[in-house]
Image (cartoon, rainbow, N blue to C red):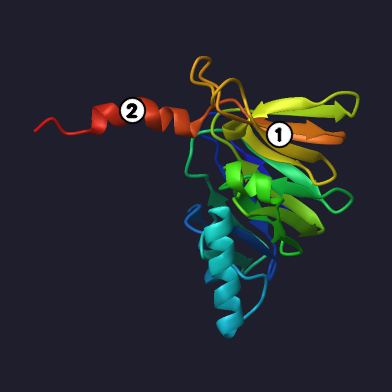
């Protein structure tokens, strides 16, 4: 994937250059503009499955991961094709290399990927499914090989774990993590953090990488919701 990113890290824009017949998959609704040399086609987000089986698969991915039922494929019509994309939330965009390493993705972080990259549903342990906000019963795990763009709410901090001790991250701040890491979802403190304000946390074990977003969309929603309630 050949792309350039705007210098503004708060509201970044990605321009992707495509040759003739070259393709890239983007999150449904992420396109901002293109230069007229792009063909956009929407399809079920089903990893190539069609018919009833594809619809069931796309629906399952949607309800389990928070991703859209549809995904958009941008195809270059000439060797000078260009399409610009942006995420729906203000924050950073980061490229992940898929192949030698695979990643597990939190809800709603997918932005774009090479056509040879996919992400599939991976069943979680029942304890993670009950407590987690990271996909419920299923989590999304990458497959294939190529580049994957993820987006965050706020900046992205990359933490390398050496396996010597556990690492704890608030559940709402996790963007993605190496698929080789083991993790559990715990109560942050006390009775769901009533005294400290901390709720559920992800405790990671092993060697790998964790991507963390610096802002919490749920906390923002809770903060502004009283102001949105009508007093009439």
Question: Which of the two residues, 18 or 184, is positioned nearer the viewer here?
Answer: 184
Q: Which residue is mark 1?
A: 211
Question: In which quadrant is the C terminus drawn?
Answer: top left
| Residue for point 68% across, 55% down | 113
Q: Which mark is residue 61?
A: none
User: Looking at the picture, does residue 157 appear above or below residue 72?
Assistant: above
Taking 133 as reference, is 160 left or right?
right
How many angstroms separate mark 2 from mark 1 (CA)?
26 Å
| Residue for point 61% across, 44% down | 134
The reply to whether the C-beta atoms of the residues labelled 2 and 1 are less than 8 Å apart is no
Density class for disc 2 (Cα within 10 Å; few <14, some 14-19, many ≥20) is few
User: Looking at the picture, does residue 222 appear above or below residue 53?
Assistant: above
| Residue for point 58% across, 54% down | 65
Taking 178 as reference, is 191 left or right?
left
| Residue for point 75% across, 51% down | 147
Density class for disc 1 (Cα within 10 Å; few <14, some 14-19, many ≥20) is many
Identify the residue at the far front of this view.
191
Query: How many discs mark residues in the rendered view?
Result: 2
Q: Which mark is residue 224?
A: 2
């Amino acid at each position: 994937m050949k792309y350039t990113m705007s210098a503004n890290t708060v509201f970044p824009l990605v321009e992707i250059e495509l040759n003739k017949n070259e393709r890239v998959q983007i999150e449904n609704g992420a396109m901002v503009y293109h230069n007229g040399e792009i063909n956009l086609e929407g399809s079920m987000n089903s990893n190539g499955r069609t018919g009833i089986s594809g619809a069931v698969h796309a629906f399952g991915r949607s309800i389990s991961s928070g991703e859209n039922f549809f995904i958009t494929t941008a195809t270059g019509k000439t060797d000078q094709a260009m399409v610009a994309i942006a995420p729906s939330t203000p924050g950073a965009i980061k490229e992940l290399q898929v192949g030698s390493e695979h990643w597990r993705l939190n809800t709603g972080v997918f932005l774009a990927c090479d056509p040879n990259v996919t992400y599939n549903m991976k069943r979680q342990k029942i304890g993670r499914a009950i407590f987690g906000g990271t996909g419920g019963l299923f989590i999304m795990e990458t497959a294939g090989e190529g580049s994957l763009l993820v987006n965050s709410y706020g900046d992205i901090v990359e933490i390398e774990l050496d396996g010597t001790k556990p690492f704890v991250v608030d559940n709402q701040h996790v963007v993605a993590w190496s698929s080789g890491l083991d993790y559990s979802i715990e109560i942050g403190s006390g009775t769901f953090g009533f005294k400290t304000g901390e709720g559920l946390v992800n405790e990671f074990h092993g060697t790998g990488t964790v991507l963390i977003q610096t802002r919490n969309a749920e906390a923002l929603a809770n903060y502004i919701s009283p102001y949105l309630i009508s007093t009439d």
